[in-house]
Image (cartoon, rainbow, N blue to C red):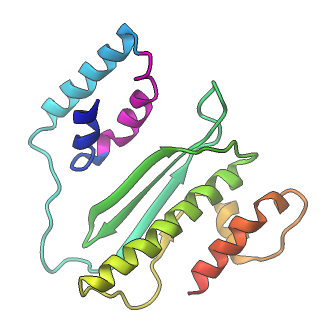
């Protein structure tokens, strides 16, 4: 398991599979070892692929987020993913099951956006310290229109009041 977790640092395409697989390591069954072999066979097939960083391509830091809504039928918790791109290459990514149960798709996307924004603050500070300060805002690409509209319009109504704190954090982050 630790070897697969280590491999996710260079193979972001296996992040979600390894994340789900790791949830069963406390009491693994035969099927989990079969899944591990499938992941390893996939890695063997893809061994010639990798991440190549080139000079002179897009300099901006961008981030992409996505979240599911109650994918896990056991506890109905959502999984959110994000990836940070620099010079058109992935430099940081995550696929993580959330510790809370979200009540709607928009809340699941807001939780993912907030997690991504917190990581962006940290990563932005790292970039400043290694002399790559970015000018202007860092765009967040989100595929949920309701989340985008709500983040731009501060009008909260009864159906979205429960995400008020995350909303204010995200809108403050977007302003700065």
**24 is within the stretch colored magenta:** yes
Q: Position of residue 161 (x, y in %)?
A: 84, 62
- For the point 35% across and 8% down, the residue is 30
- For the point 66% across and 77% down, the residue is 171
Q: Nearer the viewer, residue 67 or 143?
A: 67
Toward the top, the furthest residue is 30
Q: Position of residue 123 (x, y in %)?
A: 38, 72
Toward the right, the furthest residue is 158
Q: Quadrant of residue 92?
A: bottom left
- For the point 12% across and 77% down, the residue is 55
Q: Nearer the viewer, residue 159 or 114?
A: 114
Horizontally, residue 71 falls left or right of residue 40, namely: right
Q: Where is the C terminus found, in terms of image quarters? A: bottom right
Q: Where is the N terminus found, in terms of image quarters? A: top left
Q: Quadrant of residue 57?
A: bottom left
Q: Position of residue 34 (x, y in %)?
A: 30, 14
Residue 35, compared with residue 124, is above or below; it is above
Q: Nearer the viewer, residue 143 or 98?
A: 98
Residue 113, compared with residue 152, is above or below; it is above
Q: State whether the magenta stretch is mostly helix, strand or loop.
A: helix
**89 is within the stretch colored magenta:** no
Q: Position of residue 111 (x, y in %)?
A: 62, 57
Magenta range: 13-27
- For the point 37% across and 64% down, the residue is 84
Residue 90, compared with residue 9, is above or below; it is below
């Amino acid at each position: 398991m630790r070897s697969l977790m280590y491999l996710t640092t260079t193979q972001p395409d296996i992040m979600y599979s390894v994340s789900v697989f790791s949830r069963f390591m406390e009491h693994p069954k035969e099927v989990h070892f079969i899944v591990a072999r499938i992941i390893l066979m996939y890695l063997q097939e893809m061994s010639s692929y990798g991440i190549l960083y080139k000079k002179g391509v897009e300099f901006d830091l961008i981030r992409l987020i996505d979240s599911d809504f109650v994918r896990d039928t056991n506890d109905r918790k959502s999984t959110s993913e994000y990836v940070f791109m620099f010079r058109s290459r992935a430099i940081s990514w995550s696929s993580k099951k959330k510790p809370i149960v979200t009540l709607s798709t928009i809340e699941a996307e807001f939780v993912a956006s907030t997690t991504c924004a917190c990581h962006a603050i940290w990563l932005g500070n790292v970039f400043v310290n290694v002399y790559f300060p970015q000018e202007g805002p860092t765009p967040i690409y989100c595929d949920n229109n309701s989340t985008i509209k709500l983040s731009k319009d501060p009008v909260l109504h009864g159906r979205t009041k429960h995400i008020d704190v995350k909303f204010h954090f995200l809108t403050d982050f977007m302003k700065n």
